[in-house]
Amino acid sequence: MNPKVFISHASEDKQRFVLDFATKLRSKGIDAWIDRWEMLPGDSLVDKVFEEGIKNAQAVIVVLSKNSVNKKWVREELNASMVKRINKGSKLIPVVIDDCEVPECLESTVWEKIDDLNNYATELNRIVMSIYGQTEKPPLGNPPAYTETIIDTLPNLTNIDNIILKHACEKAVESGMPSIETESILGDIKSQDIPEDELIVSLEVLDKNGYIEIHGDSGGGIPYFNISLYGFYEYAKKYIPDYNKIVDSVAFQIVNLNMEDNKSISASLNQPQMIVDHILDLLESKGYITLAKTFGLTHIVRVFPTLERILKE
C-alpha cells in the first residue's frame, strides 16, 4: 500500500517548491497530500486538513521557510503532527528550504536542508528513504573466517595467533621440516580473511612467546621462521589425535625394538617424519636419549634407563 504523506506549508512556498516537491514524491509511489489537489469549493478546511490529511498520513512533512515558520495555520498543523507522533509514532519530517529559524519543538528532530530548490535529488532521495523506512547503511556481510574458526587457544595467544601457528605446524608436518617460508602459508592465512600485515604481527608475538624462532628479519619482513620444540609440542597436544600414545610408541620402538634412526621409526609407525623427529627431540630434551643428526637423518646414539622406566609406568 502506498504511504500517505501530508505536506504542511505556507501558500507562498507552493509555486516555488511545494508543487514540484509533491509531484516528485508521487512519482516515487508516495501519496502526497496538499490542499491544491485535495480540497474543492465547499469543503470544510478543518475536516479536510485534520480529519483527512493529517489523521490518515503515515508521515507529515513540514516545509519550513521564512514564510511558514510564523504562519498560525502551519503552527496548528505542526502541533497536531507532534501530538500524532507522540501518540501513534508517525513520522514528522522537517524540510528547511531557506535560512529560517527552526521552531524550538523541532530542534531535537533531524531535518533535511535543501539549498537549491531547482536541484535537490539527493535530499529528495533521503526523504523518500525515510518515508519508506529504508537506510543507506550498507548490509552486513559475513564476519571474517578466522572469527568463526573453532580453535583451542594456547597460552598468551589470540585466535589469529593460534590459527597461524596451527597452519605453520601443519605445513611443517607436510614438508617434514620445522623451517617454514612465510610466503608458503600466505594462501592458508588469506583463506581465513587474515590480513597480511596481521600475519607479521602475529609471527612476532609467536616468536616472543617461544612458539617459533624468527630468522632473517632485518626490517624487510620475515622471510622464514622455525617452529620451536615448545611450539610444536603445544600444537601437537591440541591437534594431533592420540599424541601421547604416539610418544609412547616411539619410545617403545627405541627401547624394545632397538630402532636406531628417525626414518626407521617413521616407517614402522606410519607416522610423518616431522612428528617422529619432534618426539625424538622432545625425548632428548628430557634427558631420555642422545641424538646425532647428519643430512636429515637422526641417529639415536644413547638410550638412558629412565626411558625404559617411563614405559613401565
Image: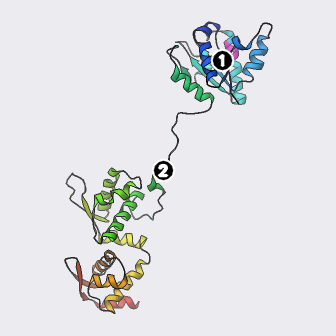
Q: Front-most of 104 and 12?
A: 12
Residue 67 is at least partly visible in this image = no
Q: Which residue is mark 1?
A: 7
Residue 30 location in percent, x, y? 65, 24
- The secondary element bearing badge 2 is classed as loop
Q: Front-most of 85 and 136?
A: 136
Residue 214 location in percent, x, y? 25, 61
Give the vertical position of 154 relative to 95 (above or below): below
Dot label at residue 111: none
Quarter holding the C terminus is bottom left
Residue 263 location in percent, x, y? 28, 82
Q: Which residue is mark 2?
A: 143
Quarter of the image for residue 176 reads bottom left
Give the vertical position of 160 relative to 179 (above or below): above
Q: In the image, what residue occupies the spot 32% across and 81% down?
A: 266
User: Position of 123 compared to 176: left or right?
Assistant: right
10 Å crowding of disc 2: few (<14), some (14-19), many (20+): few
Type of amino acid under label 1: Ile
Q: Front-most of 269 and 250?
A: 269
Residue 92 is at least partly visible in this image = yes
Residue 40 location in percent, x, y? 76, 9
10 Å crowding of disc 1: few (<14), some (14-19), many (20+): many
- The secondary element bearing badge 1 is classed as strand
Mark 2 or mark 1: name the one nearer the start of the chain. Answer: 1
Quarter of the image for residue 103 reads top right
Quarter holding the N terminus is top right
- The verdict on residue 223 being magenta is no
Hey, which residue is sitting farthest front in the picture? 27
Magenta: main secondary structure: helix
User: Position of 273 compared to 40: left or right?
Assistant: left
Where does the magenta region start and end? Answer: 74-78
